[in-house]
Amino acid sequence: MFSLSFLRSRLAVGPIVLALTLPPALACAQTPPQDDEIARSILEKSDEIRFPKEGFQVDINIASSAPGREPELRKYRVLSKGNENTLVMILEPASERGQIMLMKGRDLWVFMPDISQPIRLGLAQRLTGEVANGDLARSNFSGDYTPSRLRTDKINGEDYLVLELIAVDRSVTYHRVLLWVNPSNFRPLKAEFYSLSNRLMKTCSYENFADMAGKRRPTRLVMEDALRPGEKSVLEYGQIKLRDLPDKVFSKDYLKKLQ
């Protein structure tokens, strides 16, 4: 993936339930600060469903496919702490083992065994298939986007709040995201990702929820290209292990010990 040639070229439940059950006109009549506060609380709780706030480790298998092509299989190990510090290590294919991405805040670098200096990457750059660097290195919606409530959709008999997320600046992975969240348990159902020109780029569904690290979390993500039908990446998450990760792990010097 990181080939040398490529690299060079529950806020209180009451207010939430009340807001969702109000007629649209009354819901819109609420003051903007109240609306933003509720949307942010729901988004933060949904983030906690997807990944722990504490330090953790998880292995991710990604199968990317497209019509007429053999599936591309890759495996990564992710170490993350507080959504601000992340290591992404390539485990497979073996030819690329030893390449490591380091994210601190929204700064991202890749370290390669045969290159002495790290190379700067963008969060929106393609990692593999339909997966961007930021999809693995920084899945912190509440830290990267300003949320607001857009509407409520009924899907399979359940109400889902549709949150509109606008990027806080151009360094984040996507300019705009629509996220469907179940307000009764804060589980994400699906997301749509948009470009700066407001063009739908890809969609994501959150599937196969299972108990891991104290919460019921999605263990399978399906990301589909909205511009090229049939192209998709399926991310399968292994068991999330909570780990006490010292800050020194997320430093350029420490990475030399991991390669």
Image: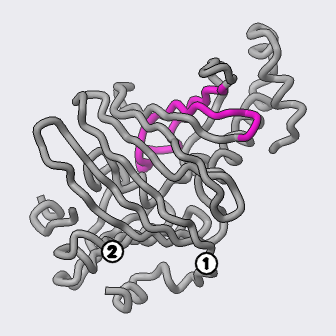
The quarter of the rendered structure image containing the N terminus is: bottom left
Amino acid at pointer 1? Arg
Taking the spot 74% from the left edge, 10% from the top edge, the residue there is 24
Residue 174: x percent and y percent? Answer: 42, 41
Instruction: Say above or below: 186 vs 227.
Output: below
In the image, 75 versus 125, the foreground residue is 75
37 relative position to 158: left or right: right
Residue 152's quadrant in the figure?
Answer: top right
Q: Marks 2/1: CA distance? A: 19 Å
Residue 11 % position (x, y): 82, 42
Q: Which range is magenta?
A: 160-185
Query: Crowding near pointer 2: few (<14 within 10 Å), some, many (20+)?
Result: many
Q: Position of residue 50 (x, y in %)?
A: 59, 52
* Image quarter of residue 156: top right
Image point (33%, 32%), residue name: 201
| Residue 100 circle label | 2
In terms of secondary structure, where does tag 2 sit? strand
For the C terminus, which image quadrant?
A: bottom left
Q: Nearer the viewer, residue 212 or 137?
A: 212
Query: Which of marks 1 and 2 precedes in the sequence?
Result: 2
Residue bearing mark 1: 243
State whether residue 18 is above or below residue 102.
above
The amino acid sitting under disc 2 is Ile
Mark 1: which secondary structure?
loop
Q: Give the residue at the far bottom of this rendering.
A: 257
Q: Residues within 10 Å of mark 1 (few under 14, many from 20)?
A: few
- Looking at the image, is mark 2 or mark 1 nearer the viewer? 1
Residue 90 lies left or right of residue 80; in this view the side is left
Residue 173 in magenta stretch: yes
Q: Residue at x 66, y 19 (%)?
A: 157
